[in-house]
Structure formats: structure tokens, C-alpha cells
Amino acid sequence: MKLIIAEKPSVANAIAPVVGATTRRKGYTEGNGYIVSWCYGHLVGLSIPDNYCEEWAATPWTFEQLPMIPERWKFRITDSSKEQFMVLKQLMADSRVDGIICATDADREGECIFRYVYNLCGCKKPVMRLWVSSLEAAAIRTGLSQMQSSSKYNSLFNAGFSRAKADWLVGMNFSRLFSVRYNTRLNSGRVQTPTLAMIVKRDADVKNFVKQKYFTVELNCGQFVAVSERIDDESAAAQLTAACNGSTAELTEVKKENKKDNPPKLYDLTTLQRDANKMFGYTAQQTLDAMQGLYEAKLATYPRTDSQYLSDDMEESTTAVINEILNASTFRAIVPDTAYTPDVKRCINNAKVTGHHAIIPTMSGAKADLNALPEEQRNILLLIAFRLMCATAMPHRYTYMSVTASCNGKLFYATGKEVVEIGWKAIDQKAKAVLKKSDDDEPEEQEQTLPVLQQGMKFTNVTAEKAEHWTSPPRSYTEDTLLSAMEHAGQDNYNDETEKKGLGTPATRAGIIEALEKHGYIQRKGKKISATEKGVTLISVVPEEVKSPKLTADWEMKLQQIERGTYNPAAFMQEITDYVRSTCSSYGSADSSVTFVKPMQSIGNCPKCGSEVKKGKFGFYCTAKCGMFLSKVFGKELTETQLTSLLSGKSISFTRNGTKTIVLPEVVENTYNGKTNWQWKTKKG
């Protein structure tokens, strides 16, 4: 009998009927020679420092505890998963089971999830690996027929385990190091801190930007407009305008080129998250959650991929999916009016498909009732469907014309384009009209269409006008642009064809952004992401190497090399360990020159005892602790503005259960459950 272990119950439920396991048991399903069970994600993980020794568990934290370098790594079972862990342990030890099939997600994390459990159970039974990118029955059957020994994926586990240990060493040590150094609880991470550093730098660039005025002269030649180069001096622009107005312009150069824009690549997770943020304002985590839901519902392929290509064995099945989309009424809105014959070959590149291929709809997804899906899943499925159609459509072909005109010894320039074959942009334009929800993106510039022009043509009595412009500041990060910066490790000049050396992986970037917000280092305002004062302060005090995107990106590249078996995991871990030891040694002393805690400001005086009222972690309070209950009235949390008004002697009002309540700037004594306090006086409005 074979024991199949999936990552989640939903995945196990997709596998069980394929292998004929139909009898439900507590924690597993069995039948037809198979037992199908599951983890709940990370059933087992690396232990926290407290579980290693008394010294590391002692509080308050001290420099003497650092660095914490485990001689032997310990694991712990999460409290909520102990019952399921025992189910798996018993199944692995079951004498009926003669082999195990690892069916966790086919990536670093999935490999670690399985092996942590397998190793902690002390299991020695042979393991085969199920590797699938879709949970459709046909894909699972194919995967089962092509399984290979788990040992083939040792490098994948080595990369995942190395990443986990590196994150532990950097995160645990540096969080304690800087918390003790600056006497406040701080969180620092191998990827988290460099990401925050990029946000802080962008905020500073925006804040410190000084806009500059410049000018151009626009020459209206009747059928088109030519524009001068940038002119910084207004008087020079005015003189050129006066000299050219009413004069004759002559075309000194006319160039005509046939050009094309190739279709966009298919989605990997990061590009999908970026487009979903631009289109719908979704966070990276929202997009990942929606994609995970589509994957588990068998409507889309595996989400956590960094590939934008398909393998050559997918040509026929992908063409069938596209044809189903073209025939499905639910996708009718994005089907182009122009002729469209899908060319899947342009999306195939075996060399660029490693663990998983690009994200596309499955056949079930192409047949799905979109109206039955949650809104986020519906939008994401539409997005990947139209990207598949765009990517397999013909190039967009056009004629590009550039002209140079001379007037009074100065040169003016004009460009224009004429569409020859609209190609993939027919689908793109139609899909954006259907899907676009965001209205804060800059409109695309429309290129003028130039008439038939020839060198030597002259245009008399042209009109010249001076145009005023301002240089534009850098834009604050959005989820879209931050994901791009993380993917490229903050490098402006990045070649998409080179090996990716980014911060984190497609699977982890969403979690990194969420963690930064959770810890209070960044904030979201609409689409914009900016650093908080706490985040700015942290980046101002941590050493350069701790916040360096380049160093973290180099580590990620080495993790990729470990995954491919071309770099030694022990060498990588030695580099991380040396780095942690060195940093703890260099910064192992207190620094009182920096404070992360803002002095609490008084917002008024207590109406009961006259002492100052300040804002604390759990709301507003009287500093004399006289028993005055300030923050709530009938369970309603008062805002700072409302409380300030009351403290200044003004009444406020709000509606509760349909009745208007007026809160007076007076206090009354109240006894409840034997406890006496003072509260604001109220009356019905």
C-alpha cells in the first residue's frame, strides 16, 4: 500500500478520487491500495531560540546571548497541528505501507514541509515524488505515471532548508541585536530589511525632489506638430518662438521604419501580482490567495512559478484550452473582433521551464462559470485568460516615422506611427476595457499620425508657441512597482534575460510586504506604499550590509545555484554564519542616541482630576490613573478628535441603534459589577 502525503486537505481531496481512495477516515482517505493524507502547510518548522537552551530563553534579551548559532537544528510541531502530525506518524509506521509518495507543492517550501515531517517521524521507507502543475485529474494521472525517486529532489530540499536556516540566523539574531542595542522591540529579516530600505530611499527621493521648469517650442506645420529639444532658459525659448513664428520650416530628414511589438510573455506569479495591482488594486497577498483558490479548484495551474514559458509537451493541450476560451460565452467579452489563430509555439521554451511552467487557465478554468466565482478569483482568472490569448496572438506591426524640420537654424522633431496589423493589441485593448477598475493610472500617450512627408518639403507661415513643462518627481512605490524592485533587487538597469537576483522569491514576496505592514514599518494609502516613522528610524540605524539589497540578492542567487546542485550548501551556511557573528560583534553595545518611541503628547486635562490625558498603546488614559473611563461611550470607541472636543468643553454626538446620543463634557460616577469608575455624561438627542 502506498501513502500519499499532500500539502493541504483540498489537494488530498483532488488526488484521492484519481487513485481510487474513497473511504474516509479521521485524517486520511484510503482505498484501492492507497492511503491519502495531508499536512496543514507547515506542520513542522524550525524551533524558536527559547527551545534550545536556558540562556537563549532568558528575558530580557542581552548581548551575551548573541550570536545564537545552533550546533544541531531543532524542530517543533505547531500546537494546532499536533493531532494531524500524529496521524501521519502512525500512517508512516503502518506495516501495510511499503512506500510513500510526496505530493506536497512542487517547490522549495513544499519539499521542506514533507521532509521535515518525514525526518521528524524517523521514517526510512522509500519515497517517490509526485510533481504536478495542475490538480486536474488528467494532470495527476500523468504525474503519477512519471514519478521519480525523492532523492532526485535533494538539491531542492537543500535550497529550501538553507533558506530557512539563513532566515532564522539573520532574523532571530538581528532582531534581538538591534532590540537590545536601541532598547525597543525591533524586527529585522534577511529579505524584509533590504525591502524596507528600498521603500525608505524612494520616500526620501520623492520628498527631497525639487521640480524644475523647462520649455520647448512647438512648431505647428499645419498637418503635424514638431517640437524643439528641451530649453532651460525661458528668454531663449521666447526668442526662438518669436523668430520662428510666421517663418518657413523645411524637412531636413525623413525616416520610415517597419517595426513590431511582440506579444507579452505569459504570467509568472510576480508579473500577475503586478498587473492585478494595476488593474484592481489587489495586494500581492490577495492575488496569491486568489490564485491558490483557483489552483485548488482546478481552474488554473500552479501559482508560485517564476517561469513565463511553457514546455513543448504542452502545445496541444494549451491550444485546446484557448479554443475552449474562444467558444465559452463567459469569455466572450475579451474575444477579439479581428482574426485570431493562436500560435502556442511562441510561448514554448524548455530551457526556461525548471520547476513549473507559466500560469495559464486549465481546461476546467476555460469552462468555468465565472459568475459562480468570488470576485477576486473571477478577475484573476479573466486576467490570465486574456494574457494567454495575447501571448499567443500575432505581433503588433506598425510603420514608425520620424522627421526633422529646420526653422531659423534650429531643429524640431516629430514622430508618428501608422498601424499595419493590430495583432495582440486588439485583445489587450478589449480586455483592459472589460477589466480595468483602477482610475489613478496615468493615461497612455497617443502618438500622432503623420501625413505623407518627404525630405526637402517646405511649410510656410508656421505657428510657433512656447510650451512650459515641469520635471516629474519619482513616484511612490505601489505594490506593482515594489514587486518589480524586489524582483530586480532595486537595480534600474536590469536585463530580463539575465539570471534573476532578486529579493525573495515569487512565493515569499507577498508575505514579506505583509510582514512589514504588520510590524508597523510601512503603511498603505490607497495603492501607495510608504515607510512609517518607525521604519525610517530602523533603516537609519542598521548597518549598510544589513539593509543592502545587493547582498541579499547575491544570497538568493546562491540559493538558486544550490537548487540546481551547482553550489555547496555548507559553504553558503558558513558565509551566513560568519556574517551573523561579525555583525553581532560589531554592534554588540547599547546606543541611546536613537529613540523609536515618540514622546506621548497631551491632548487635554482629565475632567475628573485635572491631570494630563495622553495616548497609550491601548487608547487614551489619565496619567494620574484616577479611574476616569475616557475612551468609550456605550462601547463606541471615541476618536482623538471627538475626545479632544470633549476635553475642551464641547459636546459631541453619534447615532446608536437608531437613536442619537449626545455626549456632554461632564462626568458621572458609575458602578458596574461592584467596580466604580467615572464616565462621560450622556443624554438622548
Image (cartoon, rainbow, N blue to C red):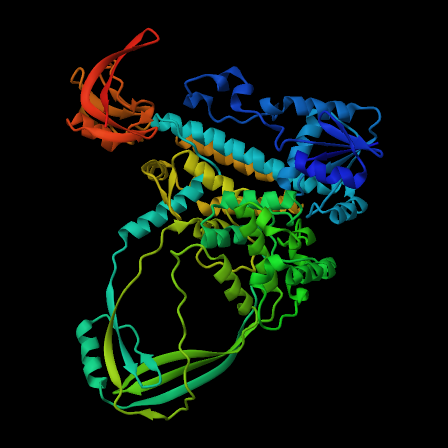
Q: Quadrant of residue 584?
A: top left
- Position in image of residue 508 (x %, y %): 54, 42
- Position in image of residue 460 (x %, y %): 28, 92
Q: Quadrant of residue 99?
A: top right
| Quadrant of the drawing holding the N terminus | top right
Q: Is residue 511 left or right of residue 321?
A: left
The foreground one among 482 and 397 is: 397
| Quadrant of the drawing holding the C terminus | top left
The foreground one among 38 and 339 is: 339
- Position in image of residue 127 (x %, y %): 77, 35
Residue at the location (46% across, 22% down)? 65
Mark yes or no: residue 488 visible: no
Residue at the location (53% across, 35% down)? 167
The foreground one among 425 and 359 is: 425
Relative height, residue 253 to residue 204 (above, below):
below
Relative height, residue 284 to residue 259 (above, below):
above
Mark yes or no: residue 299 visible: yes
The outermost residue toward the top is 674
Q: How many numbered marks does the figure carry?
A: 0
- Position in image of residue 98 (x %, y %): 83, 30
